[in-house]
Image (cartoon, coloured by chain):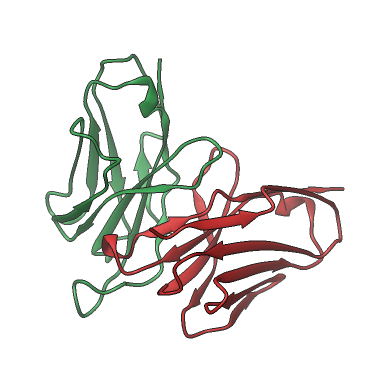
Amino acid sequence: DTGVSQDPRHKITKRGQNVTFRCDPISEHNRLYWYRQTLGQGPEFLTYFQNEAQLEKSRLLSDRFSAERPKGSFSTLEIQRTEQGDSAMYLCASSLVVGLAGGPGNEQFFGPGTRLTVL
Amino acid sequence: KQEVTQIPAALSVPEGENLVLNCSFTDSAIYNLQWFRQDPGKGLTSLLLIQSSQREQTSGRLNASLDKSSGRSTLYIAASQPGDSATYLCASKIPNSGYALNFGKGTSLLVTP
């Protein structure tokens, strides 16, 4: 399967613990996005990477959140000192941007998501 | 900030009906508009992508239209089937945040046999 994959699919943790999620984008895609989705809402943008560079972070991404894409391939999203309000589905998407780095790129493809439950 | 609204929030129809889902957006400077399907507890599956220069796109029983001037898009589903039951999300791509998608809250569709 050459689609976007995410691991783990489900994570249950206790408040105060740290968690890390992984996203593997479609192999030739150079842009990677993280979104968060809570129950009954549409996904909300968190951050995005162009190759290995993290170019923007939304205000939803507090200091407890950090994301990396060390070699421009897979990405990780870490949440430190989890809170119950962090419980959500974390979605990763990728797309291919050709030409200008600031361009819109092509269609975004989403992974299956990681559902986080903080007890 | 781009606001995306989907109406209705929920819809229940008997099998075989044709139906229309509505999506409206406040910023007409969109690059494209995308419709997704999401099954409970799952990720998003892309259904149709309409570029800003296009008026509509079709895939099988699905047809999506885009009217930038009025800030509206519609998703038309012909001859609905129970397997169409899911949440349908529309999202616009605008030139900020690296062209991240800006989503509505979705329409939850139930097609009854």
Image point (23%, 47%), residue name: A75
- Residue A103 higher or lower than B100, as above or below: below
B85 relative position to B47: left or right = right
- Residue B90 higher or lower than B61, as above or below: above
The N terminus of chain B, quarter of image? bottom left
Q: Quadrant of residue A20?
A: top left
Q: Position of residue B6 (x, y in %)?
A: 61, 55
Image point (42%, 42%), residue name: A113
Q: Judging from the image, what is the letter of the chain drawn in green? A: A
Residue in the foreground of this view, choosing between B59 and B110: B110
Residue in the foreground of this view, choosing between A115 and B99: B99
Q: Quadrant of residue A89?
A: top left
Q: Position of residue B69 (x, y in %)?
A: 53, 79
Colour that chain B carries in the picture: red
Q: Position of residue B13 (x, y in %)?
A: 83, 52
Instruction: Report whether residue B111 is seen.
Output: yes
B10 relative position to B40: left or right = right
Image point (42%, 72%), residue name: B30
